[in-house]
Image (spheres, rainbow, N blue to C red):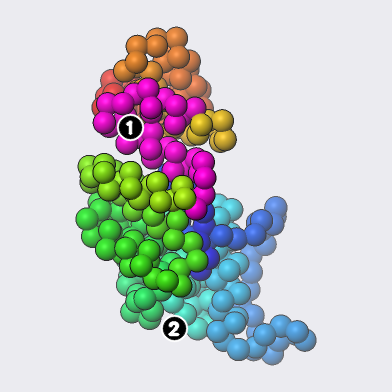
Amino acid sequence: MKSLRKTLGDCCLALVLALSVVPALAQKSEPLPDTMASGVPKDVHTRAKLHTELGSMYFQGGNLIVALEELTIAISINPNYAQAYSTRGLVLYYIKELVSAEKDFQRALDLDARDPEINNNYGWFLCQTGKEKESIAYFQRAINNPLYQTPETAFLNAGACYVKLGDLASAEAHVRKNLLFSRDNPQALFQLAKISYLRGNYDAAREYLKKVVSQTDPGAETLWLSLRVEHRLGDRSAESSLIAQLRRKYPDSVEYQEFLKGNFE
């Protein structure tokens, strides 16, 4: 599975699927027949790879059901294709099937324990499910693999996970390594803003967030961090504007609920 350079929403997902544009109208796919049309590959590895890439495209486009179907087809064609299990593990995470996701990641690692993208994916999954300490080893395996084509993805994911662990020095070091590959990456700048906020450097956090907002439409997480920064800096006008945006755009978000509770930490 190719590496996806952007996370879904504001999260650092930098998951792992650098894919082409998804068709506007996704059609449900069917298993490829054994007798293929001229020019279409017949071997099971290539067929499984094609369905995995289709599944990745649908996943990137947010069509999780069709993505799951394509990846299940890929596995039925070639039960030993590690990338299909790894990608399906990500989809299963997003539909809250965590036990099944864990099984798919483990199967992918059993088939190809050295694959850097699989290690990055599993590290990301562990970090999202409360196993931050365990995740770091998988990110490092990905980073240390000289064949990994997009190590910046694992650097960013590891940095975000170090933030969760409270190891801000390691977090900053990994995020800055991401920026060596992708200057002004908004996901990396957001992580630096978060690190600055946690260190009490609110002016620096504000500057990083300005750069993020200049490049992307801010999601709930960005608005909430910006709101807390302005609250700390005492800019009530900016704070009120951010509250209004968060309420209008993301009234059901976790971040807005935190605001309603007055939890500014």
Does residue 130 appear in the picture of this structure? yes
Query: Which kind of residue does numbered mark 2 sit on?
Result: Asn
Which residue is painted at 46% across and 43% down in the image?
187
Q: Callout 2: helix, strand or loop?
A: loop
User: Of label 1 and label 2, which has the lower sequence position?
Assistant: 2
Q: Which residue is mark 1?
A: 196
User: Overall secondary structure of the magenta stretch?
Assistant: helix
Q: Residue at x 31, y 18 (%)?
A: 232
Position of residue 155 measured from the top left corner of the image (x, y, whole percent) = 39, 54
Q: Position of residue 246 (x, y in %)?
A: 46, 24
- In the rendered view, tell whether residue 3 sits above or below residue 262: below
- Is-magenta flag for residue 240? no
Residue hosting label 2: 80
Which of the two residues, 248 or 186, is positioned nearer the viewer here?
A: 186
Mark 1 crowd level (few <14, some 14–19, many ≥20, 10 Å Cα): many
Is 187 one of the magenta-colored residues? yes
Q: Quadrant of the C terminus?
A: top left
